[in-house]
Amino acid sequence: MSGSRKEGIGATIRGNFYICQKPAHYMLTLVVGEAALELVPLSIANHPVVLRSARKRGKPPGAMLLDSNFHHAAMKTLDDAERRGRPDIVHVILLCALESVVARKGDLTLYIHTYNDYCIWVNPETRIPRSYNRFCGLFEQLLEKGSIQNFLKVEEKSLAEILEELPGEKVVLERGGSPFKIQKDAVCVVGGFPHGGFLTELSHPKVAITEYHLPAWTVVNEILVRYELL
Ligand SMILES: C[S@@+](CC[C@H](N)C(=O)[O-])C[C@H]1O[C@@H](n2cnc3c(N)ncnc32)[C@H](O)[C@@H]1O
């Protein structure tokens, strides 16, 4: 990972936790990969649009989530700008996943891997705020502190490292892959970015839901319903 991909993440994010041991019963593991979720990188912290939104929020620029809705003009100088600054993707995925039947049954394990190679473990009992602003506040606090009680925990880890440590049948969801058939011990990797493919080279089988381009949260819903009906 390049040094620039580390920019903008709170230096306090460290600490060892998990990774989940083989469970006593089969579980679905969802890994949202390369998610467009990060704090505002230092390199654009002094850009006028960033300063304006920081003033409005009453926060230091580097303590806010990067959001292309507000920071688009400043993001033009960032690498991979088109695939960053979309925390709303993670927000919708979390609402879908954590309120699903699979999660209610206690059969879901969920990780969010971010563009900057941080891995967020999400306790399936976490109640994610439905309000986007409150979601941003919670995740800003998480990325600065490294954890929120026993609900959300951050660890520095690449996508490849996460997948290496997880037990189960790993597949990468990708348009153009072979037809998707879910397994009881599935580990499903879904891209948490708005455009393009994975930057990480993933050797696991690629599987597709359909030939259509789908948003990541629709893919997550498809996986969850297929798992529920297994
Ligand atoms: C918004 S897409 C990223 C853009 C993607 N290259 C596209 O053209 O659809 C986010 C993620 O959703 C998943 N995805 C989208 N369409 C899919 C499909 N038809 N089958 C399986 N996964 C899909 C992939 O994991 C992808 O990384």
Image (tube, rainbow, N blue to C red):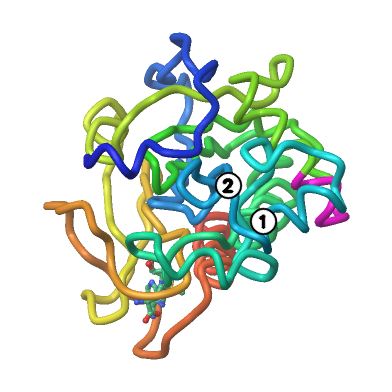
What amino acid type should be assigned to the residue bearing mark 1? Val
Q: Residue at x 21, y 52 (%)?
A: 200
Q: Secondary structure at mark 2?
A: loop
Q: Is residue 128 above or below residue 82?
A: above
Q: Is residue 117 above or below residue 121?
A: below
Is the CB of the residue bearing disc 2 within 8 angstroms of ligand 1?
A: no
Regarding ligand 1, which quadrant of the image does it lie in?
bottom left
In terms of sequence position, does the residue under pointer 2 or pointer 1 come before the other?
Answer: 2
Badge 1 marks a residue whose secondary structure is: helix
Q: Which residue is mark 1?
A: 50
What amino acid is labelled 2 in the image?
A: Ala
Q: Are marks 2 and 1 in contact (CB under 8 Å)?
A: yes
Prevailing secondary structure of the magenta residues: helix
Q: Circle 1: is it few (<14), some (14-19), or many (20+) Cα within 10 Å? A: many
- Provide residue 69's location: percent of width, then percent of height: 67, 70
- Image coordinates of residue 65 in percent, x first then y, are 64, 47
- Vertical placement of residue 52 versus 170, above or below: below
Of 54 and 215, which appears nearest the observer?
54
Query: Relative to residue 218, is residue 70 drawn left or right?
Result: right
Q: Which residue is mark 2?
A: 45
Which residue, as the protein is rendered here, is positioned at the far bottom?
Answer: 212
Magenta-highlighted residues: 130-136
Q: Nearer the viewer, residue 117 or 173?
A: 117
Q: Residue at x 47, y 10 (%)?
A: 15
